[in-house]
Structure formats: C-alpha cells, structure tokens
Image (cartoon, rainbow, N blue to C red):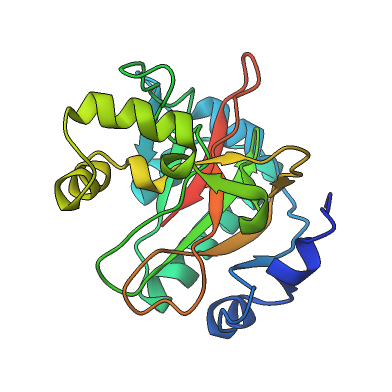
Amino acid sequence: MKKSPLATTQFKNVTSFQDLVNTPFQGNINALCWKRTLIGDFSEIANKLICTGTLATVSIEELLTLQLSEQGKLARETLLHDMKLLEAYGAAPILNVIENYERDEDLPWFPTDVYSFHVDRSPIATDTFLCTYYGAASDILPNNQAAQKILVPEIRTALKKLYQGEEGTGFEAFLNEYFFDLHYQAKPNAQPINLEVGNLWRLAVDHPESKVLPCVHRAPKEKAGERRLLLIC
C-alpha cells in the first residue's frame, strides 16, 4: 500500500474482522484496514452480473444464480462470507456493480458527487465499511492534507453569491442542506492513499458521538471498459 508520511498516524492495519469492528477510533486514527489477499475470479462475477444502467445493486439470490467457474465460485464464497460477517455485526451491506456514478454537473466549480473528496455524515453513531473486489479502488486523504471547500475564500464567496444572502445561520443551513460542507479539496503536495483491491476498510463518519475527525475519501475514476465490484455499508 502506498503510504503518505502521515499515513501511519491516521490509518491503521488490523489482522481480522473482529479487530476491524472492535478497535476504537481514537486520537488521529479514523480509518482501519483489514488488509487481505483474496482468492478467486471477481472479474467473472462483475462481468456476468446484469447492470442495465450505470449502477446496480446485487442481491444474494442473484449471486447464487450465477453460473461460475471454480475460481468464480471461490470469489462468490468470499462475497457471501463478507456480507454475513457485516450483517451479523449489525450493518446492512450493499453489493454494487458499477459502470460509473452519476456526475453532479449543476455547479462545475463545486461538484457534490462521490468523485469529490468528502466525508460521510449520520445523525446516529455509525461507521462506513467498504471493499473493492474488482476494478478501481477508492482513495482516502489525511485530514491535515485536506481543506474543507466552504472555507476556501474564493469558493465561500461564490457560495454566498449563490445563496444571495449574508453569512449567518441561514447561510450555514444552506451549506448543510446542499451538502457543500461535506466536501474537501486536496492541499498542495497532498498524497491520497489508495484503498487497494481486496481490503475491507472501516472509515469514521461525522456523527454526534464521534471522538475523531471523519475520514475524507472519494470514489475513483473508473478504468475504461472495466466495471467495479464494491461492497459498502
């Protein structure tokens, strides 16, 4: 895994699922990685799944109906096992096959889609889990290498013009309502960390009980002609 100089202070590797879910976020640590080398042919599953649009959610039943090679079956066993682990923990895993995500083109100077560095927010205590089994993997960014976009002077000025009002509680509510406050940009010389294929990650979320900063992350640009197979919850 490519590391930035700050990676060791913010991101931590664990060796099991139990460690992944039981290790607390504390101090600067807001991302945990169960680093794995998976066996099986996940590309076979990604390419055999039906995806009539740009993204499809895959059910367990659909997985079980696929006619697969022996390597494809090994990959399917891993997918089913990971989903069962997360469900037993109390999470609600979703398996997606992705051609690409929808782009936010309303404000070209401030897109709020998942390709932009962002944090997740929840009104209740929770974490984000994700694993890329095939295709391009997501990136995370150390918080001190990220700048919240709404605090960048020229962006804030443009947002005030869009809001058509003065700064205050109304403006802050506007930033929250349209998710502007969730998005970040990389500082000069920032070094995003790729999550790599096969690793199961747990990322800190912005919620009222959190004791750490939320983890800044983004979806990758897909490789031409290659789907992604992603588990997320």
Tell me if I can see residue 11 in this picture.
Answer: no
Q: Is residue 170 left or right of residue 57?
A: left
Q: Residue at x 44, y 20 (%)?
A: 109
Spot occupied by residue 104 in the image (x, y as percentages of width and height): 36, 22
Q: Nearer the viewer, residue 44 or 33?
A: 33
User: Picture quarter containing residue 227?
Assistant: top right
Q: Residue at x 68, y 57 (%)?
A: 199
Q: Nearer the viewer, residue 203 or 110?
A: 110
Spot occupied by residue 228 in the image (x, y as percentages of width and height): 56, 33
User: Picture quarter containing residue 139?
Assistant: top right
Q: Quadrant of the C terminus?
A: bottom left
Spot occupied by residue 191 in the image (x, y as percentages of width and height): 76, 44
Q: Residue at x 56, y 79 (%)?
A: 25
Q: Residue at x 58, y 56 (%)?
A: 77
Q: Is residue 32 above or below residue 58?
A: below
Q: Is residue 17 above or below residue 217?
A: below
Spot occupied by residue 149 in the image (x, y as percentages of width and height): 47, 40
Q: Is residue 170 above or below residue 134?
A: below
User: Picture quarter containing residue 186?
Assistant: top right
Q: Nearer the viewer, residue 49 or 107?
A: 107
How many numbered markers are drawn? 0
Q: Is residue 179 above or below residue 85?
A: above
Q: Is residue 1 left or right of residue 199?
A: right
Tell me if I can see residue 84 in this picture.
Answer: yes
